[in-house]
């Protein structure tokens, strides 16, 4: 029987963090998820939502803070939906992510005694090379948590400085030009400071572009059309060149992306495999980086822009043993036989059941599964572990200050 109402306040003790960075309290058999509260703290909370089986709340006063609490440098942290664990000391964020993976692997895949190597991030701020802002009237900002309402920020502390500078300038433009509208704005950059803007809206393009002249932009897309510069920007990873088109996936944390890819390269270095698949290959980055260690590398990717880029990247980097197929993995996978190893890097939803089953039929010697959602990874592992054992799991901290976890899980066939 629910005894609380919305807006009720009470003092609670926080037992642990849930997988999304909320503090978890239990009061009279009622679970309460508390935003901005940490384990071992006593906090005054206000109930924000009544759900069937639990309550949501926010911490309105930290009565006894834990030593793991740090001051938050972002003034928008309470309202913005981008970060969840900025109030937790960085080394504790790493512990939180490790525990989350251990729990999910145990719960969904029955895995115990997991060997995890954690690769931490040198930068906890200013690490993102891509940001998406949304517009409404003359405002341009980030979405508030679980809402389409905007918070117009001064800076986003997670994004690289150059992206914030462009954002400032465009906000100023909107304030000065009351007839200009921006519905959404994506800014991407490479490590050599090539910038791409992708925006939709209604504005005087000529005036807008000359206003942004100081930034020497490489590529601007407006209402789905290239209106300035090149069609792509080019990133360098370990001496390989990768073209990035507007609709193509590309990792957003350059330093940690290299660390992640290094883990995969190190694995393949001494394997002498003949044929390796790179499924969900995006612009072909991972496959191309390991291609010198294998005889033949085949990538599969559904997004047309990514496949165009992958084919161009293959030519620029002169890798004749690499080919790419366009389409869904689930539509291509049945045709593969005699595959030594499979690289998997699916979106958060993980693998579909047909892909899981077919991988078991193909029976490669090893699988390197890269995942940005340990819950779907653990679900997929449950099936794959019928024939495979986990060699190692690497946690690459690609997204500091958020609850997001990037894993590389190496599997070997029994
Ligand atoms: C996490 S990204 C990985 C990209 C690439 N491995 C990299 O490191 O840049 C996932 C990729 O899977 C692609 N994708 C999503 N669903 C797919 C499907 N059913 N079949 C093939 N590719 C898919 C997305 O377009 C995206 O490029």
Image (tube, grey):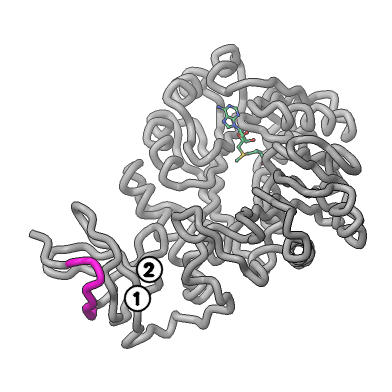
x and y, in percent, of residue 73 in the image = 58, 79
Q: Which dot marks residue 112?
A: none
Q: Earlier in the sequence, mark 2 or mark 1?
A: 2
Label 2 to label 1, Cα distance in Å?
A: 6 Å
x and y, in percent, of residue 366 in the image = 56, 32
Crowding at dot 2, Cα within 10 Å, few <14 / some 14-19 / many 20+, comes out as: many
Q: Residue at x 56, y 46 (%)?
A: 408
Crowding at dot 1, Cα within 10 Å, few <14 / some 14-19 / many 20+, comes out as: many
**Circle 1 — which element?**
strand
**Which residue corresponds to mark 2?**
35
**Which residue corresponds to mark 1?**
59
Q: Quadrant of residue 18?
A: bottom left
Residue 12 shown left or right of residue 175 in the figure: left
Residue 133 shown left or right of residue 28 in the figure: right
Q: Is residue 110 magenta?
A: no
Whether residue 258 is visible to the viewer of this picture, yes or no, is no
- Pick the residue in front: 307 or 389: 307
For label 1, being within 8 Å of ligand 1 is answered no
**Circle 2 — which element?**
strand
Q: Residue at x 42, y 52 (%)?
A: 114
Q: What stretch of residues is rendered in magenta?
A: 5-11
- Kindly give the residue lying farthest to the front in the view shown: 179
Where does the C terminus fall, quadrant-wise? top left
x and y, in percent, of residue 190 in the image = 80, 53
Compared to residue 5, the image places residue 207 above or below, namely above
Q: Label 1 near label 2: C-beta < 8 Å?
A: yes
Q: Is residue 7 magenta?
A: yes
x and y, in percent, of residue 134 in the image = 62, 53
- Pick the residue in front: 67 or 392: 67
Whether residue 28 is visible to the viewer of this picture, yes or no, is yes
Where does the N terminus fall, quadrant-wise? bottom left
């Amino acid at each position: 029987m629910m005894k609380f109402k919305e807006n009720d306040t009470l003092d609670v003790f926080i037992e642990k963090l849930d997988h999304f960075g909320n503090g978890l309290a239990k009061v009279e058999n009622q679970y309460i998820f508390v935003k901005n509260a940490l384990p071992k703290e006593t906090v005054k909370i206000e109930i924000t939502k009544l759900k069937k089986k639990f309550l949501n709340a926010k911490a309105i006063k930290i009565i006894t803070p834990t030593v793991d609490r740090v001051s938050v440098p972002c003034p928008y942290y309470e309202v913005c939906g981008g970060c969840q664990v900025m109030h937790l000391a960085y080394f504790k964020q790493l512990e939180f992510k490790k525990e989350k993976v251990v729990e999910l692997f145990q719960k969904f895949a029955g895995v115990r005694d997991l060997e995890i190597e954690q690769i931490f991030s040198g930068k906890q701020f200013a690490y993102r090379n891509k940001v998406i802002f949304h517009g409404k009237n003359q405002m341009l900002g980030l979405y508030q948590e679980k809402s389409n309402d905007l918070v117009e920020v001064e800076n986003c502390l997670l994004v690289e400085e150059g992206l914030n500078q462009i954002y400032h300038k465009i906000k100023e433009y909107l304030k000065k030009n009351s007839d200009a509208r921006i519905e959404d704005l994506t800014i991407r950059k490479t490590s050599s400071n090539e910038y791409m803007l992708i925006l939709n809206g209604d504005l005087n393009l000529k005036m807008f572009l000359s206003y942004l002249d100081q930034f020497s932009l490489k590529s601007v897309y407006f209402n789905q059309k290239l209106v300035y510069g090149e069609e792509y920007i080019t990133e360098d990873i370990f001496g390989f060149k990768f073209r990035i088109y507007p609709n193509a996936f590309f990792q957003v944390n350059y330093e940690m992306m290299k660390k992640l890819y290094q883990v995969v390269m190190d694995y393949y270095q001494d394997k002498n495999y003949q044929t390796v698949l790179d499924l969900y290959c995006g612009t072909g980055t991972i496959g191309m980086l390991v291609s010198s260690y294998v005889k033949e590398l085949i990538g599969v990717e559904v997004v047309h822009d990514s496949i165009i880029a992958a084919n161009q990247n293959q030519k620029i980097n002169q890798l004749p043993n690499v080919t790419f197929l366009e389409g869904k993995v689930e539509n291509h996978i049945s045709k593969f036989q005699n595959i030594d190893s499979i690289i998997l890097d699916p979106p958060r939803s993980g693998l579909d059941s047909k892909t899981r089953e077919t991988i078991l039929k193909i029976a490669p010697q090893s699988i390197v599964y890269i995942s940005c959602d340990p819950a779907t990874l653990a679900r997929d592992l449950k099936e794959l572990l019928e024939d495979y054992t986990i060699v190692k799991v690497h946690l690459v901290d690609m997204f500091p200050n958020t609850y997001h976890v990037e894993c590389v899980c190496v599997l070997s066939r029994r």
